[in-house]
Amino acid sequence: MINNETVSIDRIIENLIYLHPLLSKSLTRSIRSKTNLNPGSLYILGMLSKHEILSMSEIGCKLSMPKPHVTGQVDKLITEEMVERLFDPNDRRIVNIRMTEKGKEDFKAIKLEVSQDMRQRIEKLNDEKLNALYDSTQVVRDILSDIMIDTKMTLCTKI
């Protein structure tokens, strides 16, 4: 016998699983038309724009990326002169990453172009759907942030 709580949770999980490819496909297509950087590199730039300087381990933790994957992405961003490595003067084993001025400018321009592309799609909605989209995305964002805080804290403290 399935109770209402199980059905409800299963439906939530199904909706979340369904949303990821929809958002990912839409954003990836828009991003790919604006830059040669892949989404992983852009996620790293986004984290650095928010936190300014992060260690390789912190980037991996915040983005749930394995450290070798972070290293590969950071290496590409260094080649593009968008980020730089900073060695910790107290512990040379710690490698911090910071966005360069070029990285900040390029990321801002990419973000603006992608936002404009999304804006054109969203502006086609009527007021009722626009309000519903705003309300529902805000609620989902808040709830997922609450759920993920515990997970990220657990994962990040293991480093």
Image: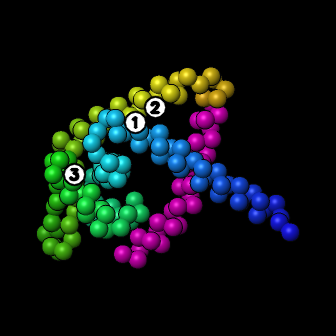
Question: 10 Å neighbourhood of mark 2: few (<14), some, or many (≥20)?
Answer: some
- Residue contact at pointers 3 and 2, CB within 8 angstroms: no
Q: Position of residue 155 (x, y in %)?
A: 44, 71
Who is closer to the viewer here, 39 or 136? 39
Q: Return the disc, 3 or 2, that comes first in the chain's sequence.
A: 3
Give the SS element for disc 1: helix
Image point (41%, 70%), residue name = 156
Say above or below: 68 vs 30.
Answer: below
Q: Which mark is residue 1?
A: none
Location of the C terminus (image quadrant): bottom left
Question: 10 Å neighbourhood of mark 3: few (<14), some, or many (≥20)?
Answer: many
Q: Residue beneath label 1, please?
A: 30
Q: Quadrant of residue 4?
A: bottom right
Q: Quadrant of residue 136?
A: top right
Q: Position of residue 90 (x, y in %)?
A: 16, 73
Q: Real-space Cα distance between discs 2 and 1?
A: 8 Å
Q: Residue beneath label 3, please?
A: 77
Location of the N terminus (image quadrant): bottom right
Who is closer to the viewer here, 21 or 4? 21
Q: How many marks?
A: 3
Q: Residue beneath label 2, please?
A: 118
Callout 2, which amino acid?
Answer: Met
Q: Quadrant of residue 58?
A: bottom left
Give the SS element for disc 3: helix
- Residue contact at pointers 3 and 1, CB within 8 angstroms: no
Give the SS element for disc 2: helix
Q: Position of residue 10 (x, y in %)?
A: 71, 60
Q: Position of residue 101 (x, y in %)?
A: 18, 42
Magenta residues, start to end: 131-159
- Residue contact at pointers 2 and 1, CB within 8 angstroms: yes
Who is closer to the viewer here, 149 or 12? 12
